[in-house]
């Protein structure tokens, strides 16, 4: 589904990514881990079109992405969340989800201006779909609350719901459990697994919380100083000496 081959990116004299090769198959959850500064967010920015590689290729279902704009990538079926939450704080949770769906709206600007029947029907449909997403993530009680006033964990779930509102086939999650307690993390892990099982969505998840990585991931890539140093199942990665040295530390048995 998603394939990266020999992707590199430099910022001045700093090599953020060096010949990264990575694959996310359909209906699989792939983890990307590594210490701070390893290049993980740079990689997800490149996949989502916020940045572009200096060299290498990126394809999604055979379509080249390395020079594509973010809105085109979204329409192809890729959505993402952010390490730092980027909701429309002054808008309600419901409005955040309705706006996200406009990326696949069929009504024209003229339809909206004249309040045409097609526009009115589409807006009703978008509202209902948004309400369904809120219920799915346990946020139905927050529908009319400004996103910026929601508890942190609710904002995290709302951001994932907003990404889903665009109708993706591939979801990129950038540290989705940052700031969550262990119970919230486990619950979010269950939601992530259901996205694959119920919706057939492929997921690339960047995360420092190894409990979540082991809970949801079929396969893991380890990035260190811009290079992939290991790839395998969670158990294989846990036992890999290079990974232990670079990232997990000597107490790695405690994070299974």
Image (spheres, rainbow, N blue to C red):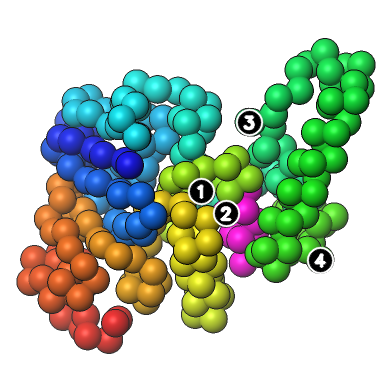
> In the picture provided, is 175 more to the left or to the right than 54?
right
> In the picture provided, is 86 more to the left or to the right than 203?
right
Numbered badge on residue 160:
2
Q: Is residue 161 above or below residue 244?
A: above
Image location of residue 236, percent across then percent down:
15, 72
User: Looking at the image, which residue sits at the far left?
Assistant: 241
In this orientation, which residue lies closer to the viewer: 196 or 173?
Answer: 196
Whether residue 169 appears in this view of the structure is yes
Separation of disc 4 and disc 1 at Cα?
22 Å
**Which one is closest to the eye, mark 2 or mark 3?**
3
Residues marked 4 and 1 touching at CB (< 8 Å): no
Q: Earlier in the sequence, mark 2 or mark 1?
A: 1
Residue highlighted by disc 1: 81
Callout 3: few (<14), some (14-19), or many (20+) C-alpha neighbours within 10 Å?
some
Image location of residue 178, percent across then percent down:
48, 64
Numbered badge on residue 103:
3
What segment carries the magenta color? 153-162
Separation of disc 3 and disc 4 at Cα?
25 Å
Numbered badge on residue 141:
4
Q: Is residue 248 above or below residue 223?
A: below
């Amino acid at each position: 589904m998603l394939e990266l081959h020999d992707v590199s990116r430099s910022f001045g004299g700093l090599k953020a990514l060096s010949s990264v090769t990575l694959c996310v198959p359909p209906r699989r959850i792939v983890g990307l881990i590594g210490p701070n500064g390893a290049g993980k967010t740079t990689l997800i920015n490149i996949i989502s079109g916020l940045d572009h590689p200096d060299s290498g290729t990126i394809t999604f279902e055979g379509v080249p992405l390395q020079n594509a704009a973010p809105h085109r990538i979204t329409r192809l079926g890729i959505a993402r969340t952010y390490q730092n939450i980027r909701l429309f704080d002054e808008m309600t949770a419901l409005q955040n989800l309705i706006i996200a769906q406009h990326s696949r709206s069929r009504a024209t600007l003229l339809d909206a201006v004249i309040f045409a029947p097609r526009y009115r029907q589409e807006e009703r449909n978008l509202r209902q779909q948004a309400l369904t997403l809120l219920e799915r993530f346990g946020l139905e009680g927050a529908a009319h609350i400004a996103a910026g006033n929601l508890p942190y964990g609710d904002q995290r779930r709302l951001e994932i719901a907003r990404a889903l509102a665009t109708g993706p086939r591939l979801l990129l999650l950038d540290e989705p459990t940052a700031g969550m307690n262990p119970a919230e993390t486990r619950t979010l892990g269950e939601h992530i697994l259901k996205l694959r099982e119920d919706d057939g969505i492929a997921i690339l998840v960047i995360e420092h919380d190894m409990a979540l990585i082991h809970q949801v991931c079929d396969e893991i890539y380890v990035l260190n100083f811009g290079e992939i140093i290991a790839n395998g199942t969670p158990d294989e990665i846990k036992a890999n000496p290079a990974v232990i040295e670079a990232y997990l530390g000597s107490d790695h048995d405690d994070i299974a």
